[in-house]
Amino acid sequence: MSDDETWMRAARDFAVAEKGSDPANTPIAAILVLDGKEIARGVNRTAECCDATAHAEVVTLRAGGAEHGDMRIEGATLYSTLQPCGMCTFASIWAGVSRIVYGAGRKDVHEMYFEDRHLSTLDFVVDAYKDDLELVGGVLSEECANLYYRPWDDVPEEKQAND
Ligand SMILES: [Zn+2]
């Protein structure tokens, strides 16, 4: 198994440990790794904290900055079980993260998870912004996608929280 797969498996296991495997509980997790060592991890806490910004990646970047003693965590890799949204991608840029590695991509999950109609935020970032932010998708994509509503799932309107 590659290092990316090892960390992604750790993130997926953490998501399940914290939130179970029911997609209704948004079991999304992130782990921040610097020089081969984990410095922070987090799960989505939007519902519990009534905080729209408490995505797993942002929770993890906050904890990682505190642990690192600097908001800039250059050279770090952010692992996320689900393709990061626009907010989290840009938060990663502000944090100086060097790589984002994600599990399930937008094609693997229900459209409710993504805010944009056509343009992938990641594509936008790759095209328009930093050329030193590496993006790697699809690591253990099926195992991660199995935690979420899938494209073919009939998700009731009230569960389509997009958080
Ligand atoms: Zn996000």
Image (cartoon, rainbow, N blue to C red):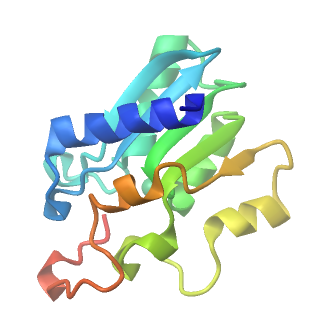
| Image quarter in which the C terminus is found | bottom left
Determine whether, in the image, residue 53 is placed left or right of residue 65: left
Q: Is residue 30 above or below residue 116?
A: above
Q: Position of residue 2 (x, y in %)?
A: 59, 32
Q: Position of residue 99 (x, y in %)?
A: 68, 39
Report the number of numbered marks: 0
Q: Is residue 155 above or below residue 91?
A: below
Nearest the eye: 71 or 86:
86
Residue that protrudes farthest toward the right in the picture: 131
Q: Position of residue 42 (x, y in %)?
A: 34, 34
| Res 59 visible | no
Q: Residue at x 57, y 35 (%)?
A: 4
Q: Residue at x 44, y 42 (%)?
A: 58
Determine whether, in the image, residue 38 is placed left or right of residue 112: right
Q: Is residue 26 above or below residue 31?
A: below
Q: Is residue 107 above or below residue 100?
A: below
Name the quarter showing ligand 1: bottom left
Nearest the eye: 41 or 1:
1
